[in-house]
Image (tube, rainbow, N blue to C red):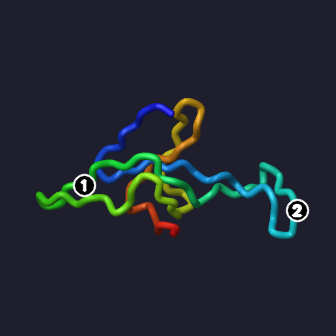
Amino acid sequence: MANLKPLADRVVVKPAEAEEKTAGGLIIPDSAQEKPQRGTIVAVGPGRVENGNKIDMSVGEGDAVLYGKYAGTEVTLDGEEVLIMRESDILGIVE
């Protein structure tokens, strides 16, 4: 993937693969698959400045995260789909 450095409090997230089967083993067609709301952070910005104070990021590269259904902007880099979103769009870190 191209070297992309997000600015301020933005992160680059590689979405997880969409589920292709249900728990019962039924195959879900592409048209019915939901967008994943889980992914892995591949790049992190330096943080934001608020009232003259620098606020560091609370997530880092390699963290598995959950994010909102319509969060971020989809971008294709070197044929790979990624999302660029603000740290505030991340709902939580999966441990």
- Crowding at dot 1, Cα within 10 Å, few <14 / some 14-19 / many 20+, comes out as some
Residue 58: x %, y % from top left: 34, 63
Which numbered disc covers residue 26? 2
Residue closest to the eye, 21 or 60:
60
Q: Is residue 23 left or right of residue 71?
A: right
Type of the residue with mark 1: Arg
Residue 54: x %, y % from top left: 18, 57
Mark 2 or mark 1: which comes first in sequence? 2
Residue 81 position (above or below residue 24): above
Q: Which residue is mark 1?
A: 48
Asked whether disc 2 touches disc 1, contact meaning CB atoms under 8 Å apart, the reply is no
| SS at circle 1 | strand
Q: Is residue 71 left or right of residue 8?
A: right
Type of the residue with mark 2: Leu
| SS at circle 2 | loop
Residue 75: x %, y % from top left: 52, 39
Residue at 58% x, 37% y: name it.
Answer: 80
Residue at 59% x, 32% y: name it.
Answer: 79
